[in-house]
Amino acid sequence: MSDTTRLPGDALRIRDLRISARGRTIVDGIDLTLARGGIHGLAGESGSGKTMTALAVLGLLPGGMMASGSIRLAGAGAGGDDVELVGASRRTLGQIRGRRIAMVFQDPSTSLHPQLQIGRQLTDHMRHHLGLSAAEARTRAVELLDRVRVPDAAGALKKYPHQFSGGQRQRIAIAVALACDPSVLLADEPTTALDVTVQAGVLQLLRELVDDSGLSVLLVTHDLGVMSAIADVVTVMRQGAVVESAPRRQLFTDPQDEYTRSLLAALPGSSFEETPDELVDDLIAGRGAVAADDLDARADVVAADSIDPDSEGATR
Ligand SMILES: Nc1ncnc2c1ncn2[C@@H]1O[C@H](COP(=O)(O)OP(=O)(O)OP(=O)(O)O)[C@@H](O)[C@H]1O
């Protein structure tokens, strides 16, 4: 499924993606480009098609849904060519899922098997996709858990998901997602189930991973406060269509579409009579703990999480 086309600077390029279910249009011809090493936020009201867009990238749409158009993944084919994912064979998608494109969900339990030790969940994945020996996989598993700041990484390998708090489970789910060094991470509401303090740590982790490794993240969330804190580019969807897409600050300070304006107006502290900087500051203040400028200052929270295994609790 590869050809000789290459996507310079882009990790993933979606063009004219249409998704339908039994004659009903779910996604109506959207374009979306993920730059290498960036966070692309996908926002919009419930039911606007964000999750189905992410699932289409993985070829995991629910039964009865059909996708058309183009989703091209850079550099995943033979010789580093791009791969077309729409209409790709099960074999091609199986090689790409988890290896080249990984996903984390709102509920980490979706990604983690409740009855398997964390170590096994990390190493099975790596041994299968990367062909590592048991010892090599274990070493990499410890490194990954350290990287996502799970305390006592070596000890954590022997534990089960229920032995961790909600925030730590999400960090572990991110470690599992990153195990095979994917180029694209699809994160669907990854912090929605966590309390605000814990959200800050997980968002900061995502930011660091992007900055350190060149990972490209598609961050699906209805929460524009989260977007204001972390996304480089934000695309807003409504009723299956893209209404606006722009760099974060531009979207927050000079929204072009009426729907985007209404979403922003609904955020705490926002007012279009303010200067752009004041507006962003207010939006950030409205979310408190997840502000981009605030994330550095929250490093102490993250550090504390690393010490106390029970310091991250879920609000569910
Ligand atoms: N299994 C399914 N069969 C048919 N339609 C579905 C199915 N799952 C979801 N839909 C429909 O697809 C549309 C888009 O859903 P999607 O989950 O992508 O929205 P979303 O923007 O992610 O919303 P939310 O923020 O609530 O998750 C919705 O109208 C939904 O009802």
Image (cartoon, rainbow, N blue to C red):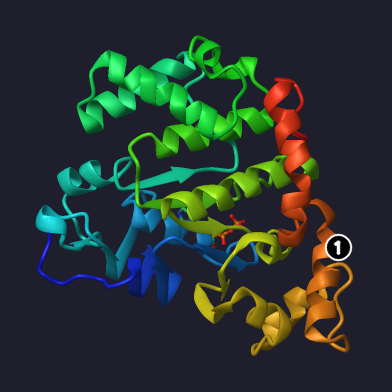
In the picture of the structure, the residue carrying the numbered disc 1 is 286
Q: Bin the neighbour count of mark 1 within 10 Å (Cα to Cα): few under 14, some 14-19, many 20 and up.
A: some
Horizontally, is 146 left or right of 289 in the view?
left
In the image, residue 55 lies at what x, y percent? 41, 53
Q: Is residue 234 above or below residue 95?
A: below
Query: In terms of depth relative to the viewer, which is nearer, 164 or 54?
Result: 164
Q: Quadrant of the C terminus?
A: top right
In the image, residue 117 lies at what x, y percent? 47, 13
Mark 1 residue element:
helix
Query: In terms of depth relative to the viewer, which is nearer, 54 or 82?
Result: 82
Determine the residue positioned at 56% across, 19% down: 161
The answer to which image quadrant residue 108 occupies is top right
Query: In terms of depth relative to the viewer, which is nearer, 76 or 307?
Result: 307
Q: Is residue 80 above or below residue 236?
A: above
Amino acid at dot 1: Gly
The answer to which image quadrant residue 30 occupies is bottom left
Horizontally, is 223 left or right of 88 in the view?
right
Q: Is residue 293 above or below residue 89?
A: below
- Mark yes or no: residue 222 visible: no
Determine the residue positioned at 80% across, 51% down: 289
Determine the residue positioned at 43% across, 38% down: 177
In the image, residue 94 lies at what x, y percent? 23, 41
